Image (tube, helix red, strand yellow):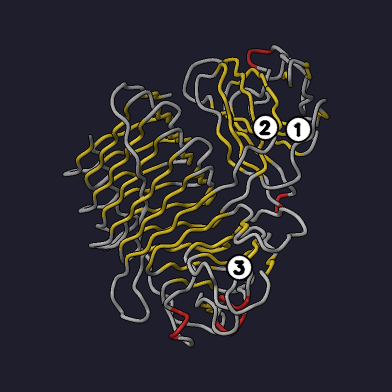
C-alpha cells in the first residue's frame, strides 16, 4: 500500500471531465424552464424538482426521460429568464406572489435516464427546503436523485451550437443521521469479499488461501469481537485455493440499513486498504460488498476494520462527465454525496473539467475509475483538475491523471481528514502530463503508483 502524508498548506477545489457527443433532441428530452404561467416564485432562484410547472409541458422527467438544464426551447420568455437555479429534491414549501397561499411540494426519490447540464450554474439540494414558511409540510422527506445513464456537465449548448460553461453544486442533508457501526477482524491471504445484508454476512473467496485457512489453520472471523468460523467446501487443513463461498453467519447487533447509505471504512489493522466495491441499493437488495485484497505481500495478515453505514440523501449516476466538450464544474459540499460507476474530468480538446469535494462527509465514490485530464482517444486532450479538502473524500477503483497524449490532469488533496483511496493502481502522467499534490496531513492510498508511464509522458 502506498500512503502519502505531507505537511503544508490547504487548498479547496475539485474537477472532472471527459469525451462525449451531444445527443440529438428526442421525444423524452424534458427541459427545465421554470414557471411557465400561473404562480410566480417570490424567490425566483429557488424551486422544487417535483413541481410540474418547472418543466416543459408540466412534465416532471421520469425513469426513461432525459432531464436538461441550461438549453432548449423557451416557451415562456417572461419567466424562463428567472428559472430557479437552486433546486430542492426534498419536501419544499414554495412562497409565490400570484397565489394566496404558499404551495407545499412533496419531494422524495427520482430516477432519470440521463442528465445534461449544458450551461449555467445550478445547485441540487437533497435536504428539506422550507421556503417562505407560510405552509405546513406533512413530513420532512429528504430526496435522492439517480441517473441510470450518464451525467454530463459542460457540453455543446443546443441553442447556440457552442461549447457551454456549466456548473453543478451538490449539497447534502443538514445534521448527521445516526450511523450503524460494526467492527470486523479476519485473517486474509489473497483476495476476498465480505458480503453483508441486514444481519447476515458471508465470504466470497477468489485466490490464494481462503479467509482463516492460510497454512492449514482455521482462524475465526470476528464481528464486534464475537468469533465465527466460516465453513468452506473442504475441511482444514485444506487452504481452498480456488474460488468459493463460505457459509452464512447471522451476526448480533443492529441490522444494516435497508436504504441508501454512505459507508465509511476505518482501518485499525491492514496491509492494504479495504474498499467498498458495492454500495447498498434497492436493485441489489441493499447488499454491501467490501473487498480485502492482500495479493502481493507474502503470507497472510490480520485485518481489522470498523465500518459505518449512514443513511444518505444524494446523487447517484452510471457515469459522471465533467467538462465534456465545454467547461464543466462540479462541487460536492456540505455533506453532499455523489456515487457513480465511472468519473471522467476534462475530455475533448479545449474542454476543461473542475471537481471540488470539500468538507467532512462530502464524498465522491466510484466503483470504477476516476480519470482526470483526457478520458479516451482520439481527441481527449482536455484539462482536468480534482481538489479534495477540509475532510472531503474520493474513493475509486483506479485512476489515470493526464491520461491521453496532450492532456493535462492535476489532483490536489489537502487538509487533515481529506483523502483519496484507489483500490488498484494510479498512473500520474499516463500518456499526458499529470500532477498529484498531497499536503497538510491529507492522505492518498493506492495499491500501486506509476509516474510518467508512456514515452513523452510527464508525472509529478
Q: Distance between the Cα atoms at labels 2 and 3?
A: 49 Å
**Quadrant the N terminus occupies:** top left
Pointer 3 or 1: first along the chain: 3
User: In the depicted view, which residue is nearer to us: 210 or 62?
Assistant: 62
Q: Distance between the Cα atoms at labels 2 and 1?
A: 7 Å
State yes or no: discs 2 and 3 in contact (Cβ < 8 Å): no
| Secondary structure state at the residue bearing disc 2 | strand
Pointer 2 or 1: first along the chain: 2
Label 1 packing within 10 angstroms: few (<14), some (14-19), many (20+): some
| Rendered view: 122 above or below 447 | below
* Residue shown at 62% from the left, 43% from the top: 278
| Secondary structure state at the residue bearing disc 3 | loop
State yes or no: discs 2 and 1 in contact (Cβ < 8 Å): yes
Place of residue 236 in the rendered image (x, y in percent of width and height, measured from the top left)? 75, 16
Residue at image mark 3: 95
* Residue shown at 43% from the left, 35% from the top: 420
**Quadrant the C terminus occupies:** top left
The part of the image, by quadrant, that contains residue 141 is bottom right
User: In the depicted view, which residue is nearer to us: 339 or 311?
Assistant: 311
Label 2 packing within 10 angstroms: few (<14), some (14-19), many (20+): some
Place of residue 104 in the rendered image (x, y in percent of width and height, measured from the top left)? 69, 66
Pointer 2 or 3: first along the chain: 3
Place of residue 445 in the rendered image (x, y in percent of width and height, measured from the top left)? 43, 29
* Residue shown at 66% from the left, 24% from the top: 210
Q: Disc 3 or disc 1, which is closer to the eye?
A: 3
Q: Distance between the Cα atoms at labels 3 and 1?
A: 49 Å
Residue at image mark 2: 194
Residue at image mark 1: 201
Amino acid at each position: 500500500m502506498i500512503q502519502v502524508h505531507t505537511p503544508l498548506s490547504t487548498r479547496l477545489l475539485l474537477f472532472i471531465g471527459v469525451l462525449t457527443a451531444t445527443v440529438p433532441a428526442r421525444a423524452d428530452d424534458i427541459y427545465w424552464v421554470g414557471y411557465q404561467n400561473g404562480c410566480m416564485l417570490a424567490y425566483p432562484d429557488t424551486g422544487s424538482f417535483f413541481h410540474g410547472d418547472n418543466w416543459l409541458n408540466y412534465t416532471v422527467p421520469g425513469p426513461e426521460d432525459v432531464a436538461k438544464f441550461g438549453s432548449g426551447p423557451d416557451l415562456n420568455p417572461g419567466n424562463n429568464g428567472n428559472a430557479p437555479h437552486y433546486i430542492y429534491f426534498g419536501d419544499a414549501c414554495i412562497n409565490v406572489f400570484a397565489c394566496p397561499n404558499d404551495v407545499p411540494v412533496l419531494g422524495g426519490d427520482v430516477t432519470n435516464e440521463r442528465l445534461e447540464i449544458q450551461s449555467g450554474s445550478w445547485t441540487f439540494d437533497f435536504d428539506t427546503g422550507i421556503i417562505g414558511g407560510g405552509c405546513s409540510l406533512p413530513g420532512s422527506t429528504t430526496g435522492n436523485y439517480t441517473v441510470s445513464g450518464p451525467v454530463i456537465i459542460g457540453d455543446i449548448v443546443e441553442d447556440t451550437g457552442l461549447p457551454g460553461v456549466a456548473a453543478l453544486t451538490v449539497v447534502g442533508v443538514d445534521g448527521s443521521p445516526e450511523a450503524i457501526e460494526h467492527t470486523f477482524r479476519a485473517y486474509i491471504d489473497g483476495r476476498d469479499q465480505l458480503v453483508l445484508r441486514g444481519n447476515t454476512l458471508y465470504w466470497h473467496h477468489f485466490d490464494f488461501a481462503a479467509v482463516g485457512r492460510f497454512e492449514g489453520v482455521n482462524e475465526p472471523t470476528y464481528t464486534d469481537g464475537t468469533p465465527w468460523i466460516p465453513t468452506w467446501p473442504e475441511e482444514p487443513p485444506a487452504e481452498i485455493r480456488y474460488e468459493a463461498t463460505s457459509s452464512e453467519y447471522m451476526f448480533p447487533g443492529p441490522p444494516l440499513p435497508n436504504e441508501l447509505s454512505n459507508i465509511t471504512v476505518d482501518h485499525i489493522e491492514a496491509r492494504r486498504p479495504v474498499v467498498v466495491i458495492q454500495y447498498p441499493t434497492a436493485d441489489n437488495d441493499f447488499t454491501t460488498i467490501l473487498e480485502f485484497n492482500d495479493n502481493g505481500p507474502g503470507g497472510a495478515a490480520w485485518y481489522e476494520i470498523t465500518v459505518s453505514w449512514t443513511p444518505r440523501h444524494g446523487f447517484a449516476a452510471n457515469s459522471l462527465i465533467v467538462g465534456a466538450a465545454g467547461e464543466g464544474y462540479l462541487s460536492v459540499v456540505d455533506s453532499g454525496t455523489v456515487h457513480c460507476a465511472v468519473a471522467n474530468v476534462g475530455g475533448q480538446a479545449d474542454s476543461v473539467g473542475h471537481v471540488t469535494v470539500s468538507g467532512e462527509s462530502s464524498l465522491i465514490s466510484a466503483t470504477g475509475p476516476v480519470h482526470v485530464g483526457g478520458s479516451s482517444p482520439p481527441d481527449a486532450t482536455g484539462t482536468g483538475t480534482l481538489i479534495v479538502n477540509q475532510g472531503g473524500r474520493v474513493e475509486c477503483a483506479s485512476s489515470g491523471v493526464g491520461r491521453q497524449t496532450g492532456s493535462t490532469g492535476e489532483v490536489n488533496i489537502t487538509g487533515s481528514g481529506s483523502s483519496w483511496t484507489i483500490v488498484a493502481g494510479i498512473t500520474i502522467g499516463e500518456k499526458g502530463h499529470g500532477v498529484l499534490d498531497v499536503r497538510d496531513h491529507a492522505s492518498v492510498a493506492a495499491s500501486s503508483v506509476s509516474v510518467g508511464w508512456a514515452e513523452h509522458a510527464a508525472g509529478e
